[in-house]
Amino acid sequence: MPSCHLVQLNIAKMKFSIESTEMSDFVDNLETINALADSSPGFVWRLQTEDGDATGIVFFGSDVLVNMSIWQDVESLHNFVYKTAHSKIMSRRKEWFHRVEEAYTVLWWAPEAKIPSLDEANSKLELLKSRGPTAAAFSFKQAYPSQGC
């Protein structure tokens, strides 16, 4: 059975431009939170530009921030998201981002050596939106175990 890693995608529609003073607290914490992710147990990879940033990636639109990362397992990602300084910053999400009624985060399993494309990530998000959680695209609330990818 092939080894698998957990991939996560989340998107957020900004209330203000990334350069605005309203976004400054968020932007000022990006480097610290990204470094925390990079050094967290179970972290494998994250989407970023050559400058180590992802705020300039406009795949979902110029007002939408995208975060995609790969982790060894659900527990590792869960620990980073909810048990580190990341949770304190994200508790302020409503200051910077519009509330979204539909799914904006998706998780799925991928072969260990594969870096998914944003097209694939978008397909997984759309699958979650249209069908709800399945083994192919799920959420923290209803996570599925790896089935060999």
Image (cartoon, grey):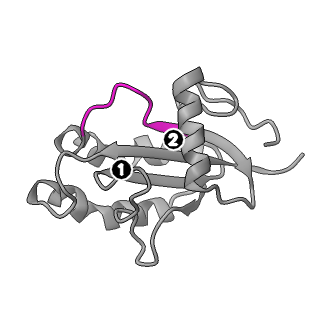
Give, as a three-letter code, the residue at label 1: His
Q: How crowded is the residue under tag 1: few (<14 C-alpha within 10 Å), some, or many (20+)?
A: some
Q: Quadrant of residue 138?
A: top right
Q: Is residue 12 left or right of residue 37?
A: left
Q: Is residue 141 visible?
A: no
The crowding category of the residue bearing disc 2, from other C-alpha atoms within 10 Å (few below 14, some 14 to 19, many at least 20), is: few
The residue that label 1 is drawn on is 86
Residue 16 is one of the magenta-drawn residues:
no
Q: Which residues are magenta?
A: 98-106
Q: Secondary structure at mark 2?
A: helix
Q: Residue at x 26, y 61 (%)?
A: 29
Spot occupied by residue 95 in the image (x, y as percentages of width and height): 17, 42
Label at residue 78: 2
The furthest residue to the right: 1
Q: Which of the two residues, 73 or 63, is positioned nearer the viewer here?
A: 63
Q: CA distance from mark 1 to mark 2?
A: 11 Å
Q: Secondary structure at mark 1?
A: helix
Q: Is residue 104 magenta?
A: yes
Q: Main secondary structure of the magenta part?
A: loop
Q: Quadrant of the N terminus?
A: top right
Q: Nearer the viewer, residue 135 or 5?
A: 135
